[in-house]
Amino acid sequence: MNTTRHTLAPLSAALTALILWGCEPAEETQPAPEASGNAAASGVEYSDPDNPGTASTPDSHWQCPQDAGQAPSGTLTAERIPGSATTREEAGLYEGPVWIGGSLYFSDFTFQEGFPSRVQRLTEEGTLETALENSGSNGLAVDAEGFLMAATHDAKAISRYELSTGDREIVWDEYADSPFNSPNDLTLTRDGVIYFTDPDFQRSAAPGGQPKTRVYRIDSDGVSVVDDTLSNPNGVSLSPDEQTLYVAGGGEQGVLRAYSLDADGQVTGQRDLAEVTVPDGMAIDCLGNIYVTEHTRQRVRVFSPEGESLAEIRVDANITNAAFGGPELQTLYLTGAGTLWQIELDVAGYPY
């Protein structure tokens, strides 16, 4: 598997002015190096909130329907997907699901030294196969060009993979001249800005690290700190209109935090929407509702954008993350302790 490093092409000045999310970072932005590759962009699965049913960029191939459906309510139960249970003997977790081209991709890592990880694929036929060996990955996403984006703890970096060849590109791997701790989850704007969380869960996978756990942003100017006050930030997602960034973290006494963004992409404030217990990953539906996994509570809690509790989806083991998939993106897929679950909903959602 070939690896290249630090290739993030600059965005246009006009686009950058619209999407940069400054929020008084704890430290100054680290400048971008000379760029030679294409910027990671996320136009793949988003619709234009101002023009429902139309693509926001020429790269889009799926949009939220004009009638997005109805949010879940009450207490529901997700079912295990037959044949999805791990066959390996080592303890570990499935993580970071993302729906790409009719298949569900997810990270599969163990708790052995270095937290070895691979990317698995659940095909349309319901069989499991290995898509990438030795990926070192946790959270996954997809960019507008179809590259697999990954928060990778083995290289302490945000990485980008070519699925057909397995070639790997290191997008960014340091802040203030030191490696990250263990990048965990990531999300991308339509214009290619990357937000990711950097807790210390797999910090020992490789040497070095940061003195704090943080939320970061990568854009054409480099890497900057979004928040360094949330202990072990974990799941991260954007609202459909990209005016709110959601981050869950804090462990046993955790929170779902919302960062409000103005028309210029500047943070105008933040608030904690809800208390959550050991929060992990999350998903967003087309109505803007937030699906937060509570790892040891073995459930997903569904919140409205205002923080109102709407529903609870239960599973039968520790849970890690969530993503919408299926032909209409109305199947909620869940990852956890060596297995996958699914539940059909009446609302469409985003693929990571």
Image: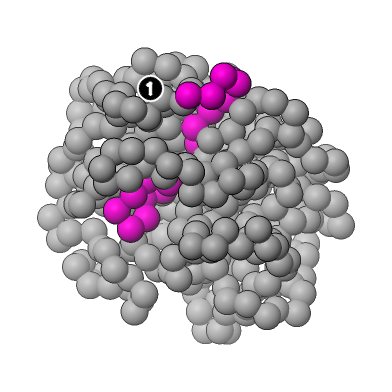
Q: State the image coordinates of residue 4 (x, y, percent, origin top left).
A: 71, 67
Which residue is found at the position 53% from the left and 28% from the top?
A: 93
- Tell me how the rendering is colored: one colour
User: Please, is residue 243 above or below residue 119 in the view?
Assistant: below
The residue closer to the viewer here, 299 or 327, is 327
Which residue is found at the position 68% from the left and 33% from the top?
A: 115
* Left or right position of 316 against 174: left
**Residue 61 visible:** yes
**Residue 259 visible:** no
Q: State the image coordinates of residue 122 (x, y, percent, origin top left).
A: 36, 42
Prevailing SS of the magenta stretch: strand
Q: Quadrant of residue 49?
A: bottom left
Residue 147 magenta-highlighted: no
The residue closer to the viewer here, 141 or 107, is 107
Give the residues in magenta.
87-105
Q: State the image coordinates of residue 152 (x, y, percent, origin top left).
A: 64, 47
**Which residue bears the numbered disc 1?**
299
What's under tag 1, amino acid-wise? Arg
Q: Quadrant of residue 334?
A: top left
Q: State the image coordinates of residue 148 (x, y, percent, origin top left).
A: 50, 58
The residue closer to the viewer here, 58 or 79, is 79
Residue 102 magenta-highlighted: yes
User: Please, is residue 260 above or below residue 248 in the view?
Assistant: below
Q: Quadrant of the N terminus?
A: bottom right
